Amino acid sequence: MINIFQIISLLGVFIGSITDIKSLEVPDWLNYSLIALGLGGHLLWSLYDWNYLFIMKSLIGFGLSVAIGLLMFYTGQWGGGDSKMIFGLGALLGLSWPLQWEFYSNFLVNVLFFGAFYGLIWVVAKGFMYRKKVSKLFKKYLKSKKYARIRVISGVISIIGLVIIYVIPNLDYSFRIVMTGLLVFLYFMNYVFIIVRAIEKVSMIKMIEPEKLTEGDWIVKDIKIDGKKIVGPKDLGIEKDQIKILIDAKKKGIIDKVMVKYGIPFVPSFLFALIYTLIYNRIVLFSFL
């Protein structure tokens, strides 16, 4: 049976999905409300029942979600709004101690599955829309020394790996086949990576004027004024005060435009994962086993 925290989560993710698709933003008021409702609601539940396990469950879920959200943000997989959304869901849905497979852990794994599938579709669609520019930039990247070195290194690793698994005697045949596939896959992932970088450069990174910045936009490079850092890619999205500083700097002729990365609206993948987990409460991959 669905509980109140799951209903709030579903409503929050639904609203977040709409705003993310429309404006590539998830408002802070929504994410902070989810965090407050999750921690506050479980605290009241603990006080009412005089049982610390409810607030502990919320804190554990929140703590794990912060770790996951920051990891995904700093590796460039999610934007600040996506990461804050998962903070709120962690506080609302929580995890029991000792850790075990339950609703929220199933949801997190499903987010990775739906997110990967959703992201792949989005990247392919973007690549098709900008195919001429992407093709041109892909050829340019292939000729660059940086990506040539990466291909050489991965190629050497793959060849050494293949030699090792076929020289070592008495290795299981199926193991050799699987490892061969993985090593070949490792090498060709270089080309996939280059294609994704080309798509990102063509369709997701833009130079815009400070006046057009909105709260939560992802700044690509550190912006410094008089040697002081104002905002950069390590921030969880640009804030209103920082936008004001950049607008004033433009008026003074210090800066002209700002490089911003517009990522994939990932919150809809949270919605798909949450709906699936609410219906089946299991990891989606198990449905194919």
Image (cartoon, rainbow, N blue to C red):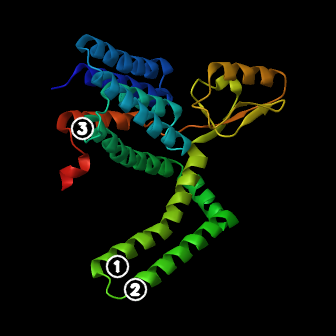
Foreground mark, 3 or 1, reads 3
Quick one: label 2 or label 3, which is nearer the N terminus? 3
Mark 3 secondary-structure assignment: loop
Residue 198 marker? none
- Dot 1 falls on a residue whose secondary structure is helix
Of the image marks 2 and 1, the number of the one nearer the N terminus:
2
Identify the residue at horizontal 43%, vertical 29% (top origin): 87
Q: Nearer the viewer, residue 167 or 50?
A: 50
Could you say which disc has been placed on residue 166 in the image? 2
Crowding at dot 2, Cα within 10 Å, few <14 / some 14-19 / many 20+, comes out as: some
Q: Amino acid at mark 3?
A: Glu
Left or right, 128 with reference to 5: right
Comparing 283 with 191, the one in front is 283
* Cα–Cα gap, marks 3 and 1: 36 Å
Distance from label 2 to label 3 (Cα)? 42 Å
Are the residues flagged by discs 2 and 1 in contact, CB closer than 8 Å?
yes
Q: Separation of disc 2 and disc 1 at Cα?
A: 7 Å
Q: Amino acid at mark 1?
A: Arg
- The quarter of the picture where the N terminus appears is top left
Which residue in the structure is indicated by mark 3? 102
Q: Residue at x 67, y 63 (%)?
A: 146
**Which residue has dot 1 on it?**
176
Q: Quadrant of residue 211?
A: top right
Residue drawn at x 47%, y 29% as measured from the top left = 84
Quadrant position of residue 138 = bottom right
Classify the position of the C terminus by image quarter: bottom left
Q: Earlier in the sequence, mark 3 or mark 1?
A: 3
Question: Badges 2 and 3: C-beta atoms under 8 Å apart?
Answer: no
Frontmost residue, 210 versus 168: 168
Depth check: 146 or 104 in front? 104
In the image, taking residue 216 as reference, residue 104 lies left or right, namely: left
Q: Amino acid at mark 2?
A: Tyr
